[in-house]
Amino acid sequence: MKELSLNILDIAKNSVKAGAKLCKIEIIEDEETLTLRISDDGCGMTEEFLKNVTDPFCTTRTTRAVGLGIPLLKLEAEQTGGSFKIESRHESKYPDSHGTVTQATFYKNHIDMTPLGDVISSVVTLIQGDPQMDFEFVHTLSGREIRLDTRELREVLGDEVPLDLPDVLVWIRGNLEEQYRDASL
Amino acid sequence: MKSLAELAAIRAKMKDRVVLREGQGDIRVVVGMATCGIAAGARPVLSAFVEGVASEGLSDKVTVTQTGCIGICQYEPVVEVFESGKEKVTYVKMTADKAKEVIEKHLKGGTPVAEYTIGQNQ
């Protein structure tokens, strides 16, 4: 992947596929590191599946037997000297608290650091793709914070206006752009 | 600032129109957005379709959706166009610029852009 924002888009799609109602995307930065955490309340993975999930030949896709999303993110984090972990609770065992948390930490100053790239486009793309789902996006850098929560937008829009309405998507993009400008992240 | 008040204004504006959107959309544009598509550059292609369909006023006629892996990863970004009563058109190795051309000639003009279809790229 050319940008971490594309990994975000890719990994968050797993939450969509897991039937999550809410997917939370956090980017936590300090001077040295960038931590990406994607958590959801989807169906989760069984212990058996979880054990193999960083193996490229483990996949949920049915069109071919290779899945590169998680292995790629893990590789990108580890090539900066960072770390990767994934925790999951499957609904069969945890009927009330199932879901998955994927977390990757990067050392930003490492020469092999993948640039973060266009996060705004990834957030807008996720909302456009699954407007019935909720996304919470938080990006923090030394005290400054960018935030967007589709549950709050839904309250304003009511039931009759979908989040993927072009005007709403334009508003979301504009809102995030302004927040980034104001925070000068 | 893009305030919540502006969002409320969108709601007010859409009040009478939303009903019209439902059940419409004779043309469906589907963009492959699995790992393979995303890595090959599908995100800007999708954005070009979403923005282009809105700005050209095609929203009543065209819906743009995302899908997973279509199975021909080497041709990503892949875009499929479904239109009732017509054969499916599969565009391959798409870019945002090619998407603009497809909007103009195919979605607006009704003629598929043959040179970007899978048939001419094998």
Image (spheres, helix red, strand yellow):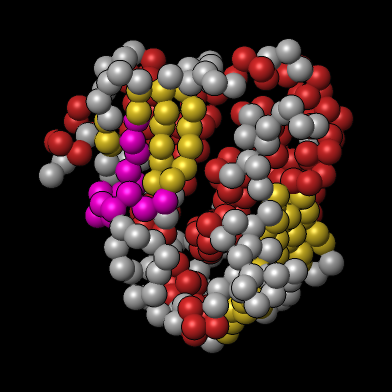
Q: Residue at x 48, y 78 (%)?
A: A49
**Residue A37 appears at what percent x and percent y?**
66, 70
Q: How many marks?
A: 0
Q: Residue at x 63, y 41 (%)?
A: A131
Q: Is residue B79 visible?
A: yes
Q: Quadrant of the N terminus of chain A?
A: bottom left
**Residue B38 appears at what percent x and percent y?**
42, 54
Left or right of A35 in this view: B86: left
Q: Residue at x 64, y 57 (%)?
A: A20
Q: Is residue A52 above or below residue A164?
A: below
**Residue A89 appears at what percent x and percent y?**
64, 76
Towards the viewer: A37 or B80: B80
Q: Is residue A127 above or below residue B49?
A: below
Magenta region includes residue B80: yes
Q: Quadrant of the C terminus of chain A?
A: bottom right
Picture quadrant where residue A100 is located: bottom right
Q: Is residue A113 above or below residue A51?
A: above
Left or right of A51 in this view: A136: right
Q: Residue at x 81, y 19 (%)?
A: B12
Towards the viewer: A81 or A36: A36
**Residue A173 appears at what percent x and percent y?**
66, 40
Towards the viewer: B107 or A151: A151
Q: Is residue A107 visible?
A: no
Towards the viewer: B20 or B7: B20
Magenta region includes residue B98: no
Looking at the rendering, the stretch of residues picked out in magenta corresponds to: B68-81
Picture quadrant where residue A56 is located: bottom left
